[in-house]
Image (spheres, coloured by chain):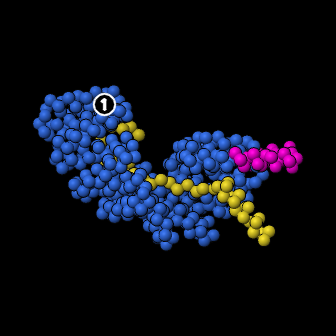
Chain colours: A yellow, B blue
Amino acid sequence: EAKSSAVASSQIFHSDGGEMEPETMEIKSVSEYFTKMHMGSVMSRQ
Amino acid sequence: MDTGGSVVSMRAEEPSFHVRYRMEVSCLELALEGERLCKVGDYRAGVSFFEAAIQVGTEDLQVLSAIYSQLGNAYFHLHDYTKALEFHRHDLTLTRTIGDLLGEAKASGNLGNTLKVLGRFDEAVVCCQRHLDIARDINDKVGQARALYNFGNVYHAKGKSICWSGAEPGDFPEEVMTALRKAAEYYEANLAIVKELGDRAAQGRTYGNLGNTHYLLGNFRKAVASHEQRLLIAKEFGDRSAERRAYCNLGNAYIFLGEFEIAAEHYKRTLQLARQLKDRAVEAQACYSLGNTYTLLQDYERAIDYHLKHLIIAQDLNDRIGEGRACWSLGNAHTALGNHDQAMHFAEKHLEICKETGDRSGELTARM
């Protein structure tokens, strides 16, 4: 987007309609997966 | 890269149990190190370890799914959205193949977020819907809330992608307003769930984005109410970045409510926090906003003070556009005070920068 130093009034105070919160990405963790697997095998032995 | 390619090649070679076991351990170790590096924010190094893990290969498709997913997220954080898309697609294909519904929901969510950033909103909506459908089917409230938040973000981004032609908030074409209203509805639906779950962090994020949506819709009182909630939650968590964002967004909303003194107070808090966080670009933006606010208050001495602060930071950051804006604003403030020599100096400087940066619109304004 080409920016100009001569800006519209709305852009004087913000450049992009307010600052957004971060996206929430889903996490798939290898370590958690193995912890669960380990717990599962321990439980099945009991 | 094809999904599960390493697995296929390993099977073709039919290595002994001992070799396979060593490969699994090696892949796992590499993936765990990649995971550790990403957790501390070193995504570049994390990517190297995850890619090495894929090269070694694994027969455990859950592990492969986690590696694809984390690679996609690492590339997402590195702003390499094409690569992020590639790995989240691999993850989606894999989870569908093995019938892992929860994994598919997560892959759909991540793919939706990536497609949104790439401006492919219709495809992003399909992914969000799949995420939501699975979460509902398996009665996963957390998943439903996250899908609704992502949905809101997609419609918010869609609305903004159409509207940016200098129009004022609340005064956009109907197509934009429709997208923004949908975003608000999804954020409200999300809030209903995260409140029920007592998830304050999620509430904070949603209030922030809902506030921005109301702002663009021209509902400035509602925007203030949402950002106040966001601010409260940011303080609960000691999250100074979120606090700073909330103060800045509140300042913007108060400007449009015509309450300039209150806006200035919020921008001053933004400035303090930007300094504490050592974020020079945000510090410059806060000074610029304060300069403009004091111009609206016709306190030109203070306006000049803040525009000069903005100018110095813009020069330090080698931000020529920011420098041009500061000069333009300084020229106007000096004109208002009758300092014609100073006004002329900054007007000429503005013109010089516009010529250098090829800013035709700014150049025309400067010549006036």
Q: Is residue B312 in view?
A: yes
Q: Quadrant of the N terminus of chain B?
A: top right
Dot 1 corresponds to which residue? B354
Residue plotted at (73% across, 59% down):
B98
Identify the amino acid type marked 1: Cys
Q: x%, y% of residue B324?
A: 29, 34
Q: Main secondary structure of the magenta part?
A: helix
Residue B185 versus residue B29 in the image, above or below? below
Q: x%, y% of residue A14?
A: 34, 48
Residue B227 versus residue B25 in the image, above or below? below
Q: Is residue B7 magenta?
A: yes
Q: x%, y% of residue B67?
A: 67, 50
Is B78 placed left or right of B68 in the picture?
left
Residue B247 versus residue B331 in the image, above or below? below
Q: x%, y% of residue B247?
A: 34, 54
Q: Is residue B206 magenta?
A: no
Q: Secondary structure at mark 1?
A: helix
Is B85 placed left or right of A45 in the picture?
left
Q: Chain of mark 1?
A: B
Question: Magenta residues?
Answer: B4-30
Q: Is residue B5 in view?
A: no
Residue plotted at (19% across, 38% down):
B332
Q: Mark 1 Cα within 10 Å, few/some/many (few <14, many 20+)?
A: many
Nearer to us in this view, B203 or B217: B203
